């Protein structure tokens, strides 16, 4: 497996990290509410629960859009169409792209 490391703008990495944290936090709150009030359907139908659900959906959409923009901006065209997996290291703002295929890719060893 080959790995390409791409430096990402630190503000973009921080933004994606914040979205990831906030959507995870919201998901955890919803899960705790559900687990704590399994026998009380009124809680799940409450305005507070619905607000957290809406927030979770919005954060998830924002996160997916930010990730798509990151891929479009930083993944080199030479890697598009190849089997890859990537991970954004928030602390270093490095995008680590693992090339999972054995194809010859111009400029990559």
Image: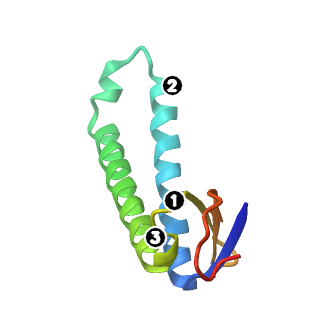
> Which of pointers 3 and 2 lies earlier in the amino acid sequence?
2
Residue drawn at x 50%, y 76% as measured from the top left: 78
Disc 1 to disc 2, C-alpha distance: 24 Å
- In the image, is residue 107 above or below residue 4? below
Q: Answer yes or no: is residue 83 visible.
A: yes
Residue drawn at x 54%, y 85% as measured from the top left: 9
Location of the C terminus (image quadrant): bottom right
The mark closer to the camera, 1 or 3, is 3
Within the image, what quadrant is residue 43 found in? Answer: top left
Disc 1 to disc 3, C-alpha distance: 16 Å
**108 or 44, nearer to the observer:** 108
Q: In the rendering, at what x and y percent does residue 96 appear? A: 65, 70
Verify CB contact (< 8 Å) between mark 1 and mark 2: no
- Report the residue that reaches farthest toward the front: 104
Query: Which residue does the numbered mark 3 point to in the structure image?
Result: 71
Q: Secondary structure at mark 2?
A: helix
Which label belongs to residue 84? none
Q: In the rendering, at what x and y percent does residue 105 appear? A: 59, 73
Which label belongs to residue 20? 1
Disc 3 to disc 2, C-alpha distance: 38 Å
> Which of pointers 1 and 3 lies earlier in the amino acid sequence?
1
**79 or 23, nearer to the observer:** 79
**60 or 77, nearer to the observer:** 77
**Residue 33 left/right relative to 61:** right
Within the image, what quadrant is residue 68 found in? Answer: bottom left
């Amino acid at each position: 497996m080959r790995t390409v490391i791409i430096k990402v703008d630190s503000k973009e990495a921080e933004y994606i990290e914040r979205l990831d944290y906030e959507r995870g936090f919201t998901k955890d709150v919803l899960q705790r509410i559900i687990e704590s009030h399994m026998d009380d359907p009124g809680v799940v139908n409450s305005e507070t629960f619905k607000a957290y659900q809406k927030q979770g959906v919005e954060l998830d959409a924002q996160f997916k859009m930010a990730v798509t923009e990151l891929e479009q901006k930083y993944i080199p065209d030479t890697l598009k169409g190849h089997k890859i997996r990537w991970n954004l290291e928030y602390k270093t703002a490095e995008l680590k792209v693992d090339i999972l295929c054995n194809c010859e890719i111009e400029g990559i060893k």
